[in-house]
Image: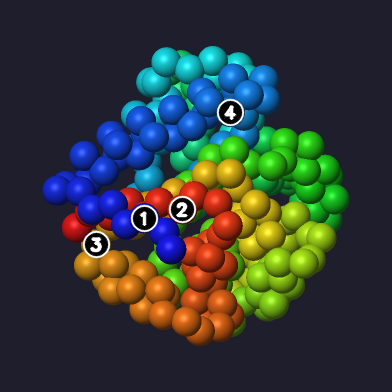
């Protein structure tokens, strides 16, 4: 059962999750000599990413990757990589090693092998931060997505999958559930009453295909949910 941490406001949430993540990355560097951090895109985690970029850490030993990416170039305002460069990969964290989730091509399938090779080299994830939508998706594991069954297969060998889903205007690339579950430390960052209600629904037993966040909530390692209205 994950730990549910509620904060009085979003600023306090962002400060606390940044501190927790920095401490866990530092511990991983001490044990392994390097650390891998996976973070979500979207605008909600941006303040956390900016705060994290200022923490005192040997960022040259940290691999940074997204949990998922829209298949758009960095010039697009919808690019999560662009957001990452503008928030986390600044200040002290400017020297971190970015593991790419996008290469220029006609389709994500065209670059899947190259991207997967680099991501695999940086696994396992030491600290994974995830968001969640009100439809209970996480990363780009959407209910009704075309390859959701493959993405949720905990016995599968896929690391990265192209994903297309109703309501998603472009294809996505996403880490699979088996990779996310294997993260040594997992944080779920949610804000707003709607997402809190969705999380409460996801906590009830049911198929992961209806609420993909369930595969993360059931991870064997430490899972912390950080929430503010």
> Callout 1 environment at 10 Å: few (<14), some (14 to 19), or many (20+)?
few
Q: Are marks 1 and 2 in contact (CB under 8 Å)?
A: yes
Which residue is situated farthest in the left direction here? 8
Residue 116 place in picture, x, y as percent: 79, 48
Give the spatial CA distance, label 2 vs label 4.
17 Å
In the rendered structure, which disc, 2 or 4, sits on the residue that comes first in sequence?
Answer: 4
Mark number displayed over residue 223: 2
Residue underneath mark 3: 192
> Callout 2 environment at 10 Å: few (<14), some (14 to 19), or many (20+)?
many
Q: Nearer the viewer, residue 166 or 157?
A: 157
Asked if 217 appears above or below 52 in the picture, the reply is: below
Disc count in the image?
A: 4
Give the spatial CA distance, label 2 vs label 3.
20 Å
In the rendered structure, which disc, 3 or 1, sits on the residue that comes first in sequence?
Answer: 1
Residue underneath mark 1: 3
Helix, strand or loop under label 3: loop
**Residue drawn at (51%, 70%), measured in percent from left and top?**
214
Residue underneath mark 4: 28
Helix, strand or loop under label 4: helix
Mark 3 vs mark 1: give the one in front.
1
Q: Quadrant of residue 196?
A: bottom left
Q: Please indicate, yes or no, whether residue 111 appears anywhere in the rendered image.
A: no
Mark 2 vs mark 3: give the one in front.
2
**Residue drawn at (41%, 80%), measured in percent from left and top?**
204
Q: Nearer the viewer, residue 213 or 101?
A: 213
Asked if 112 appears above or below 1 in the picture, the reply is: above
Give the spatial CA distance, label 1 vs label 4.
21 Å
Give the spatial CA distance, label 4 vs label 3.
31 Å
């Amino acid at each position: 059962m994950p730990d549910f941490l509620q904060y009085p406001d979003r600023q306090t949430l962002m400060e606390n999750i940044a501190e927790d993540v920095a401490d866990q990355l530092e511990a991983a560097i001490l044990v392994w000599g390097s650390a891998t951090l996976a973070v979500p895109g979207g605008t909600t985690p941006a303040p956390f990413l900016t705060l994290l970029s200022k923490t005192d850490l040997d960022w040259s030993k940290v691999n940074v990757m997204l949990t998922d990416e829209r298949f758009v170039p960095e010039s697009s305002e919808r690019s999560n990589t662009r957001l990452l460069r503008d928030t986390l990969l600044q200040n002290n964290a400017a020297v971190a090693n970015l593991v790419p989730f996008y290469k220029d091509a006609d389709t994500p399938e065209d670059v899947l092998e190259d991207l997967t090779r680099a991501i695999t080299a940086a696994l396992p994830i030491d600290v994974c931060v995830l968001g969640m939508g009100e439809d209970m998706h996480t990363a780009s594991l959407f209910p009704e997505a075309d390859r959701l069954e493959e993405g949720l297969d905990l016995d599968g060998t896929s690391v990265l999958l192209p994903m297309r889903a109703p309501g998603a205007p472009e294809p996505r690339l996403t880490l699979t559930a088996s990779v996310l579950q294997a993260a040594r430390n997992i944080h779920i960052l949610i804000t707003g009453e709607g997402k809190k209600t969705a999380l409460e629904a996801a906590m009830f037993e049911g198929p992961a295909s209806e609420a993909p966040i369930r595969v993360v909530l059931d991870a064997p390692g430490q899972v912390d949910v950080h929430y503010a209205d």
